[in-house]
Amino acid sequence: MGSNQEKKPHVVCIPTPVQGHIKPMLKLAKILHSKGCEITFVNTEYNHQRLLTSRGPDALSGCPWFRFKTILDGLETPQNLNATQDVVALARALEENCLDPFRRLITEINASDSPVTCIVADVLMSFTLAASKEFDIPEFLLWTSGAGSFLCFDQYANLLETGLMPLKDPSFQVNGYLETIIDSVPTMSGLRLKDIPPWIRCIHPGDEYFVEFFCLQLERAKLASAIFFNTFHELDNDILDAISKKFGPCYGIGPLQLLENKLVDKAITSSIRSNLWKEETECLKWLDSKAPLSVIYVNYGSITVLTPQQLVEFGWGLAKSNYSFLWIIRPDLVIGESELPPELLEEISDRGLLASWCPQEQVLNHPSIGGFLTHGGWNSMMESITSGVPMVCWPFFGDQQPNCFMSCNKWGIAMEIDNDVKRDEVAKQVLELMKGEKGKDMRKNVIDLKNKAKAACDIPSGSSMANLDKLIHLIQTSSSSSSSSSSSSSK
């Protein structure tokens, strides 16, 4: 009697299999676990093995009511086991290979004593909606990128209709055409063609597939019960309102790192982590030796790649600024074989620390960090805002261009470096960021947003906390319906 009521809701969480998507989904999974949900977290086999390599063989043993499962993506194992898979091949694999393994996993779980209550999937894993419909399981989606980028991806059909896209040939990237203002994106006044995700410009081989891929994911997203975003009402309310008019209920439940810090037991936070590269924590001791606001942190994220020339220009620019810096150069950052020139290494030896990966949230919250040179990925944006650190952005692809636009033009917390990196411009931007008048204004603005982010996560009145409660209620309602259905069918 009452056994069904005592069972925890069982949530299956499945992220897009790249670092920047796994991280926020795992945070949400831990938050839901802290709220009484049983969690099955689904990685691809390739990323599962990478996590075991970086975190140790017991890293994914989980804890009570939190387990990890895998599905195969059907791709050949790359030669470099410490690198992100090719994004075009991965996108194809998600669509062509992953639904059947996911179906088999749901069937396996449903045969246990704790069947699936609901699915929480990354928007880009929307093939899971077919399984959700087949098994009659409610599904909620998580958009792990910037909310503004969601609106931009949704604009592609309009850009085609107006003739602004696709680009006629590669010369349109450099002839000034990309400065054209787009006036059709709600709440993003002044947005230029160069500020939209470059994948939907259709220039390079494979771009057409990405357009089709993103359009398909967004079209399917309309079928989900609700979409949740790693942002907060005070930052993106106008964008979330614009999205909800077309896609249905959507809610900001971020910054997820603040909710995680507030709700999740520290033992679980430290034991279940998502880094696909081994973290070099020695950098924190190095930062301890530096004065407050004296160090610039440099990290281009998990997918961005640089040419050898860009690497050298960034290096000399950092050197010429005369500021201390912590520079993350992951193993697959540079295209081809490349090393920093010996004379540059000598020049920066007394003030620059190079590392292959680091605990970024701890670094950004360190009192010595005065600025962040970033690719502008959404996780980095959220972590910089919650740490009160202003930025210089060098957007590469994905959601980074619209994130950069919003940060520079709407929120006033960042400056942009041109794609054609020059050392003098890098040095100039770093100096302005660290001690210029514009840098001071940016620091003031980002600290204001930091305080708003913290208020959004307050218990019980914060906007993100209230939206998290809505998600919990939806999950519990799904669980009650599932229990009632199970009870009726057993009579």
Image (tube, helix red, strand yellow):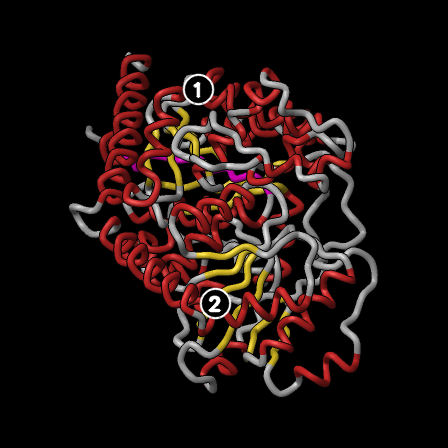
From the viewer's perspective, is residue 399 above or below residue 480? below
Amino acid type for the residue under numbered disc 1: Lys
| Residue identified by numbered label 1 | 222
Q: Considering depth in this image, is 110 or 391 the residue closer to the camera? A: 391
- Residue at figure coordinates x 38%, y 67% from the top left: 440
- Residue at figure coordinates x 53%, y 69% from the top left: 297
Residue 433 — which label?
Answer: 2
Q: Considering depth in this image, is 277 or 114 the residue closer to the camera? A: 277
Residue 474, by quadrant, is top left
Amino acid type for the residue under numbered disc 2: Leu
Callout 1: 10 Å neighbours few (<14), some, many (20+)?
Answer: some
Residues shaded magenta = 7-17
From the viewer's perspective, is residue 155 above or below residue 81? above
| Quarter the N terminus occupies | top left
Residue 278 — which label?
Answer: none
Q: Residue 142 in the image: state x and y as whole percent.
A: 43, 36
- Residue at figure coordinates x 29%, y 52% from the top left: 453
Q: Is residue 143 left or right of residue 348?
A: left
Callout 2: 10 Å neighbours few (<14), some, many (20+)?
Answer: many
Disc on the earlier residue, 1 or 2? 1
